[in-house]
Structures are given as structure tokens and as C-alpha cells.
Image (tube, grey):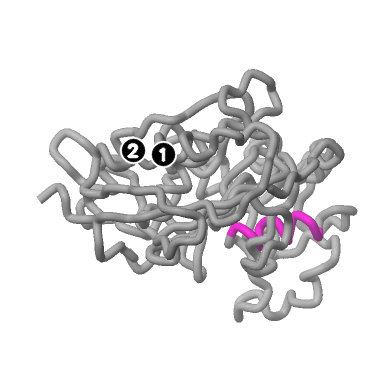
Amino acid sequence: MLSIDTTESKKHDAFKFIGHLKGCHKGQNVSGVHQLKQYLETFGYLNYNVDKHHNHANHANDDFYDDALESAVKSYQEHYHLKVTGTLDAETVKGMTMPRCGVPDIVNKTHQHHHHHHHNRKLIHAVSHYRFIPGNPRWQKSHLTYSFPTSVSVPGTENVRSICARAFQKWAEVSHFTFQEVAPDADSDITIGFYIRNHGDGAMNAFDGPRGILAHAFQPSNGHFHFDAEENWSENPAGPNQVDLESVAVHEIGHLLGLDHDDTVPDAIMYSRFSYGTTKRDLHDDDIRGIRALYGLNK
């Protein structure tokens, strides 16, 4: 079994640079702004290659706070229901520095708030805010197998198999899905593993070390589910720097099944951000309505 020593890396803080940029606004040239551009590009808010930002392409890798960056910050603030200023105010910085899922908030220039606005969103006495992954990808079968093909020892994850089994069961209880673990070398629908930094999913999906992107999972029927091996994982997080493995697993399985982030409801499992030292393992009503609507189980 390969063992990963993350002692030194845990001193790293992937999103700490954002705190040093508090108060920055358009027109300024501040050290570290290029990292903010990378952050917003990673999560889908900024793309200097699209036509409307083409004239700003020469600023893509510098520290100038240009129009394109201001627009991206405004889009981020709108997404998380913050005051839309285009400036890195205290609330925006607070949100940006929270650990989170690596799945982008915006895909192919499509903002989540435009997904699924009218179809199956309203039930009797309830307004739903769930989102589907663009294109509404779904599994064409209800019995899914999963495996752990890589054997990596990461502190705090010794019971990852039973933890993931519980996480899958949460979704099984409210849907038509059944889940079964199979041997590491079996041909499974879903593969789960721990990885470090750039691990073969492309540069935009690289992990960033502790206190940043915690994990990511891909839409149906890709089936890849990856944890960042450098995070301070725990079964029962007690410390302010520990991440609950099961809470993250339940969230990522939602992506595997076709649900997107639900950033209107902070208590939803599909909310993109997490807090250290806390647990959030139970599906919210919005998560349940979402999975049932996606697979036509409310009819």
C-alpha cells in the first residue's frame, strides 16, 4: 500500500492569498491578483478566451484588476447572493476562502441560476432550488457498482470504504438506485480514490493542496470520484482544520448522479462550500426533490 505523508503540505493554505486581496477593485495593480483570476477561471466565472473578454487577453496572467475580472467577481457575488459590487469586500473574501468542491459553478458560460428554472421546480407547498448538471446527464441503469482501484494510505481515511458505503446509502434511500462495492480490479461504474495536485484530469481539475478544493466528481456516466489526499480528513472532525470525509462523499455522489451545486440553500448537501470541524451528512429536502425530479421519480 502506498502511503502519503502530508505533514508538511498541511501547513499550506490554498486560498489564503485571497485574504491579502481584500478591498481590491477595478483599476488597481496588486500582487496576487493573477491568482484570483486563476481561481475564478477554475470555477467558471472568468474566461479570457471568449469574445467579450478578447481585448483583455493580455491581462490574463498579470496582476491588473481589469473589467473582465470585475465582471467575474460580480458574477461570483450574484451566484452566492452577496451584494454585487465587483470589489473584493469582506463577505466575498470570506466566501472565497472557504474549502469547497472542485466542480465549477458555471459550465460553458452557463450560470447555474439559469438551469432548471421552470421544469419540475415547484411542488405543492414547496419551491425547489436544486440544479441539474447542464444537459441533464443521467445514468441509464439503477444498479451502480463502485470500486477503490488505487491503494493509498491517507491519514484519517482508514475507514473510507464503510464511510462511502454509508454515503451511497443516503442516496439509495431516496431514489431508485442501488450501489455495490466490487473488487479494485473489477470493471466498475464508479471509481473512487485519493490524489495529489495534477493527477491526470487536466490542469483545470488539478488539486491545490490543503484548505482549498476538497474533492471533485464527474457527471453521469463518467464515474470518476477523487478526493484531495493532502486535506486533513477525519471520520469525526473535532479540530478547526479537519474535514469530514462522509460529508464530502455524500456531496460528490450527488454530482456522480447528475445534480449540480445548489448555492441558494446553504443547508443542502449540494451546496458547494464546506466548513472545517463540522458535519453535514443528511440530505436536505431540496437534494431529495432534485434527485427524484432528475430521474422522474415524482411522477
Q: x, y (%) of residue 283?
A: 35, 34
Vertical relation: 48 (above or below) 149: below
Residue 91 sits inside the magenta stretch: no
The reply to whether the C-beta atoms of the residues labelled 2 and 1 are less than 8 Å apart is yes
Q: Secondary structure at mark 2?
A: helix
Q: Residues within 10 Å of mark 2 (few under 14, many from 20)?
A: some
Residue drawn at (84%, 56%) of the image? 28
Q: Quadrant of residue 63?
A: bottom right
Q: Nearer the viewer, residue 79 or 67?
A: 79
Residue drawn at (62%, 50%) of the image? 151
Range of residues picked out in magenta: 34-43
Q: Residues under labels 2 and 1: Cα distance?
A: 6 Å
Residue drawn at (58%, 52%) of the image? 193
Q: Quadrant of residue 64?
A: bottom right
Q: x, y (%) of residue 270?
A: 43, 43
Give the numbered dot on residue 165. Answer: 1
Identified by mark 1, the residue type is: Ala
Q: x, y (%) of residue 204?
A: 66, 65
Q: x, y (%) of residue 18?
A: 77, 44
**From where the camera sits, is residue 75 visible?**
no
Q: Which residue is mark 2?
A: 169
Identified by mark 2, the residue type is: Gln
